[in-house]
Amino acid sequence: MTTDTIEAATVEVHDVHKWYGTHRVLDGVDLTVRPGEVTVILGPSGSGKSTLLRVINHLEKPDIGYVSVNGELIGVKRQGERLRELSERAILAQRGRIGFVFQNFNLFPHLTVLDNVAAAPVATGRLGRTEAQELARELLGRVGLAARTGAYPRQLSGGQQQRVAIARALALRPGVILFDEPTSALDPELVGEVLAVIKDLATSGTTLLIVTHEIGFAREIADRVVFIDGGKIIEQGPPSEVLDKPRHERTRDFLSKVL
Amino acid sequence: MSEPPGATVTLPEAPTADEPSKTFAAQRVLPLRRPGRWIATAVALVLVAQFVHGLVSNPFYQWDRWGYWFLRPTILDGLLITLEVTAYSAVLGLIGGIVLALARLSKSPVLRAVSWTYVWALRSIPLIVVLIFLYNFSALYKTLSVGIPFGPAFFSFDESRFATDMVVAVIGLSLNEAAYAAEVVRGGILSVDQGQHEAAAALGLPKSYQFTKIVFPQALRSIIPNYVNQLIGLIKGTSLVFYVSLLDLFGSAQTMGSTYPGDIVPLLLVVTVWYLILTSVVSVVQFYVERHYARGATRGLPPTPLQKLRTGLTALRARIRREAAV
């Protein structure tokens, strides 16, 4: 577990269906993300894009279908012809390989910025306390917050909090990082600093899946844009196609509203 | 200022209304006079003075006898019993409460039902009934225990009569306390944002770590004030152990009162003052514990009384200087 060797992961979503009660949120989603690829997921609100992200790290269980990261099934194991749910402990262990950044940051308010980042490597037994703090300092430096290690999250601006949250996700050296609308809760003038950090990650070769409404940002960094509506992938491809020459009526309709 | 409103006021004059702002610009705004507040303050002060006067001058209170009893060994022994019973029951009650709260919040319907029923039953039964029932139950159990080879270590206490009463009192109070603590703890856990559970789960933190290091410390912020409330109730609730023949603070005063009937009032005052002291100590501790767990919840920590006094004095000095300057 040395610092700068992170294996970028392959993510496969295979025919995932998900219902909330009788409401169908995901309706047979298939998606393969290659190692190091940056994928931006677009779609109207309620289209299932956040749910798709949460299915990937098993915060939500798919009702049908499965997800695999680097070929390893997430949250389930094969039992003959069927899939059997994994124990909670095993699922928690898998989550260490999948970073997640929330719209509302969800930093731990009672811990300092440094402890927020150092907590997971210590709690999961990957690093000792001093090593974890050293790593946390390094990561906080990388997101431009080396000077704020002793602060508590609520003493920071939204943009700074989100950057801490990104450092916290990086502390487990995940092969893939999922971003669930990372800039939607921010004041407009703070969006840029967070996007800059994500851009830095995109060039470093980590696999990224990003749900966002920042179309310009998507065009700039995405290798692939996926447009979702009604729980289905409507179309996907490089930004130059999906954003500039959308083939589908629904994609055109959506883009005309957000651009 | 008080120009009679009439025909002389015409529209073109309206801009002059702005002129006073130039004239008064350099002056401080005088605070509104509040005579009602002054009268209410005076009335309150008179009432307080009367009460204090009555307390001091009325011979019925026999303050000399109060002085005689206040630090008597019997009273202090009783105080010690009160403290012991409170401490054991508070700790056991809180542990029980946490277990019950977790059971109530678990996904297992059986655990939820058991926890709910326990809380329902123990909150319904008066504490004194629980205590007297246990008192008799233990007597019953003791005769039975002769023939049963279970748990000899626990009931070896029975040799000493005193220990048995203590055990009964602590068990009774803890059972009762746990029911209330369960709801306090459950409320605290529910007050923690769902996003915190999700973030802890998304980071793959082990389940026990999620509870002890992430959720519970945040829950404590709402648990502490409610549990201290509960604790103060418990301190006074211990006076009921008198009915299971344990001589706590109240019990010793009561016993002394029947031996010295003339001293009943000063003895009750001794008890009152001791309970006041205990509650005050708990409140001070509460302040600092709450302050400890406020870290991160607010941008700055709430000031300690000393800090408040200092900033208050600084503000007062600044104000006096300002008044003098005007």
Image: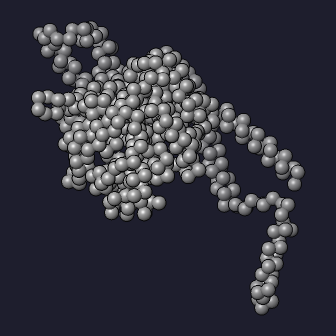
Query: Compared with residue B317, is residue B13 higher up or lower down, i.e. above or below?
Result: below
Residue A164 appears in view? yes
Most distant residue in the bottom direction: B7
Please state the horizontal and vertical placement of residue A80, each as a whole percent of the image: 11, 29
Please state the horizontal and vertical placement of residue B62, each as a whole percent of the image: 56, 30
- Seen from the viewer's position, the closer of residues B267 and A122 is A122
- Seen from the viewer's position, the closer of residues B323 and A244 is A244
- Tell me the residue at 79%/86% (across/down): B12
The image quadrant that residue B123 belongs to is top left
- Seen from the viewer's position, the closer of residues B202 and A251 is A251
Residue B262 appears in view? no
- Tell me the residue at 82%/46% (across/down): B320
Please state the horizontal and vertical placement of residue A236, each as a whole percent of the image: 34, 50
- Seen from the viewer's position, the closer of residues B224 and A133 is A133
Please state the horizontal and vertical placement of residue A162, each as a whole percent of the image: 51, 40
The image quadrant that residue A210 belongs to is top left
Q: Judge from the rendering whether residue B219 lies leftward or rightward of residue B112; answer left or right.
A: right
Quadrant location of the N terminus of chain A in the rendered image: top left
